[in-house]
Amino acid sequence: MTFRSSSSLVRMVEAAKELTEHTSVLRRIDAVLRITGVDRTYGKGRPLVEALERVAQEAILCGDFGLAQRFQRFAGYADGELFLEVVEGYYDEEARQRGEEFMRRMAALGADRAAAVLDVLCRDDPDATAADARDVFRGIAQSADHLGVEAGEGGVRLSTREVRRLQQYGHLEMVLRSLPQLASTETARLVGDVLADADAGLLAQILELKARRAALADLRAAVNAPESTESTLHACLKNQAWIFGGAYVGELARRQYTPDTILDIPLLRADGSLHVVELKRANVKTLVVRRNGHLMLGALPHQAVSQAQNYLRTLDEGRRSILADYGVDGRRASSTIVIGHSRYVGGDITPQEVAETLRTYNSHATRTEVITYETLLDSANRMLALSAEQGGPEPVEEDEA
């Protein structure tokens, strides 16, 4: 893991300090600034990440969810999970304007160079087809690994900042892959208009949605692999709180709040309370069983429910110290158990019967819900579909069983 920090982060944190009047939040922001002022590395490391997360949690307790999201993104950058350019696209107006100008120039430069390549192709071969043009550009793409920018006589000297700009080409490629195919002149004109008025915040949102699509595809592949362990599934779901729905602000960095309890995925609700996600294997043949003509949950999901109930009990009992030490309310905690998939269930039990059995079971529960990975994937895919309707990438279609 690569921790990060920068003068840009310090500047955004200082600007965010002007957005709140809550004394407890200001105190935690000051703690962040003390860390970033330690040395020339701006205090990067786990202490900075945890300090930023504590600001977010305190902001939630004060009801300032916008500020909480801001500091969660700051923490994501400091923890090496978000690019600085993505965070700046949200919260640094000057950086956003520079990003917009950079994107405009790169789009214009790329289009100009592409036109020049096509001019040469048409000059050398007047009968060239669209397939010939595709072959030329594929050849350019395949040779990209052999291109470089050299220093010294006859070469080009680049500053560190300019090198970082070159690295952004990879980010730009992700955006361009989301654009529609230029099947007509009208489509090309529309794409040109979009690029001319490119908004860095929108581009950051597209990048985030692209990352979500990739995360969902990885989870689906793991679920479809019968040999996947709980650890494999946990790795796919780490720092992907969005998959569990919009009721959660984010995943908490701390997984242990009582001496004898380590949580799989601790999520924070908007009201500051804790939600526990317990992960089990997807390949569970006895998820639902038929006994005396009736469908019911098998032994493994019942054991998982008992485990989650014990977690909630210990959180209830340690509520006072958890709230004082971590700013999280454990007394109102709830839980979700993700286990099984209808494709693995035996006994000629259909997916519809699996879903109905779980609905019946959950209708009689209060603080614990049992869902399958199938339900989790379907719900997340609908969220991506909604994002696509609002301008984001298309959702990932589920593979046929």
Image: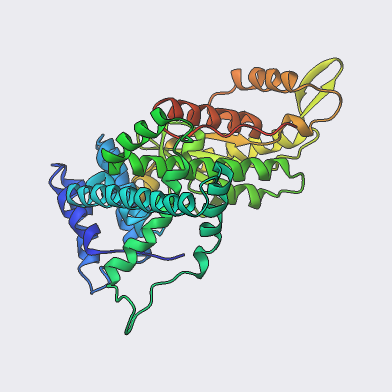
- The answer to whether residue 251 is visible is no
Query: Picture quarter containing residue 299?
Result: top right
User: On the picture, is 132 further left or further right than 107?
Assistant: right
Of 278 and 120, the residue lying toward us: 120
User: On the picture, is 345 further left or further right than 114?
Assistant: right
Residue 215's spot in the image, x, y percent?
54, 45
Q: Quadrant of the C terminus?
A: top right
Of 359 and 232, the residue lying toward us: 232
- Is 341 rendered above or below residue 143? above
At 57% from the left and 48% from the top, the residue drawn is 132
Of 273 and 207, the residue lying toward us: 207
- Is 229 rendered above or below residue 350? below
Q: How is the image coloured?
A: rainbow
Residue 267's spot in the image, x, y percent?
46, 41
Residue 347's spot in the image, x, y percent?
86, 26
User: On the picture, is 306 further left or further right than 227?
Assistant: left
Residue 26's spot in the image, x, y percent?
17, 49
